[in-house]
Image: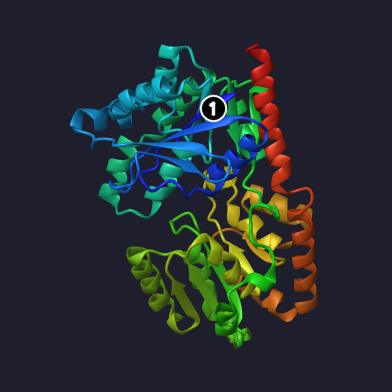
Amino acid sequence: MHIGMIYSENRPFPPDIRIEKEISSLCSAGHQISVLAPRVPKNAPLEEALGPHQAVVRRATVTESNFVERLSQVFLLQYPNWIEHLKDFIKRYSPDLLHVHDLYLLPTTIRAGRHYGLPVIADLHENIPAARRAYRSAQKPLPRLISAITYNYHLWRWHEARALQQCAAIIVVVPEAAERLYKYGIAKKKVIVVSNTEDETTFQTDPKKVDPVILQKFSSTWVASYIGGIGPHRGLDTTIQALPAARDRIPNLKLVIIGADSNEKLQILKMCRNSGVTDVVEIIDWQPFEKVASYIYASDVCLVPHKDFEHTQTTVPHKLFQYMICKKPVLVSNCQPLARIVEDTQSGIVFQADNSDDLAQKLIMLYQNPEKVAEMGKNGYQAAVGPYAWRHDAKRLIHMYQRLENKNR
């Protein structure tokens, strides 16, 4: 089957961990993949082969939206500046169906697919209506009000429900996300879970191959690390507020935050100054994927301190499984997917979301129990290469496509 994948993020592709794993698994199963992505940066090749499986990436120079197009995007969830690129992509590569990543381009892709009689698969990496609500939680009152109007939660859920009803299948990352879609009246047989898991083939797990400079840098400290995207739903404010109490009981404590851009770094530094903990926090810029494992191996405990939003109750990040596969204990908030996985695997400790006092006590508990910490790390590794390994999610994805292929014969 020839699968046309649609990627709309306004950033270079590759990389994207999830999409690249899906492409690799589907190509290994004999499928052909063509990807439509925005041309970012502007001098990126218009077309190139991706990786050993030779998936094709076609890049479109998407014009900046005018006022009318922006209104269409936020109120109708239609992207007029993409429609001709989608049609050209379909005519050029003749895919058998369209696999669109996330909600933003879903209605527009359905419109283009209908024109050519192509079914559409929705791959929902996250709960976008709830995510928009979470993102604006840290804004000042006026921008928050404007965002609440232009990215209206209830309107976007209505558009989401209408679009998903028209899809041949829907992919979500956790069972909690599937439960939310069933409330739209989506048939259970249409929804499959393909999580953000890892395994030995997708993530560097050999400690002998990590960067010795990074290991040496943090060798004399007890490192609690956070790796990944920065945003108001991530819980870094809760983490930083926990540091004064934790520092009193953990004399060599260091919080290492990896992945902040220049603006985010300023925001984090402000929080650190307000809590008086700048001396125990190190902020490191975004790092290449191959460096991530080195920072994990340099850590004593790894954090996923998500705040309690609808968004965080229906998703799980790659970092959780990356921590686990490196045999590191995890400290996570009690958002449902995180708590379910960590309690099921006994790979760490759960604290109450948004509760800095509880987070501090759990950090201290981990510091004081090194043998228990080592056991949690081993448990996490066994889960990450066992029942929570990517190969199981890949198998579900491949089976979904086999089912669709058989249905269309």
Q: Is residue 205 above or below residue 153?
A: below
**Quadrant housing residue 323:** bottom right
Near-viewer residue (15 or 185): 15
What amino acid does circle 1 point to?
Ile
The quarter of the picture where the C terminus appears is top right
Q: Is residue 368 above or below residue 323?
A: below
x, y percentage for residue 246?
59, 79
The quarter of the picture where the N terminus appears is top right
Colouring mode (rainbow / by chain / secondary structure / one colour) = rainbow
Near-viewer residue (103 or 51): 51
x, y percentage for residue 202?
64, 52
| Residue 362, visible in the rendered structure | no
Q: Which residue is mark 1?
A: 3
Residue at left offset 40%, top offset 69%: 268
x, y percentage for residue 18?
56, 45
Residue at left offset 24%, top offset 35%: 63
Residue at left offset 70%, top offset 34%: 396
**Quadrant housing residue 129:** top left
| Residue 287, visible in the rendered structure | yes
Secondary structure at numbered mark 1: strand
x, y percentage for residue 335?
61, 51
Residue at left offset 70%, top offset 60%: 325
- Mark 1, Cα crowd under 10 Å, few <14 / some 14-19 / many 20+, is many
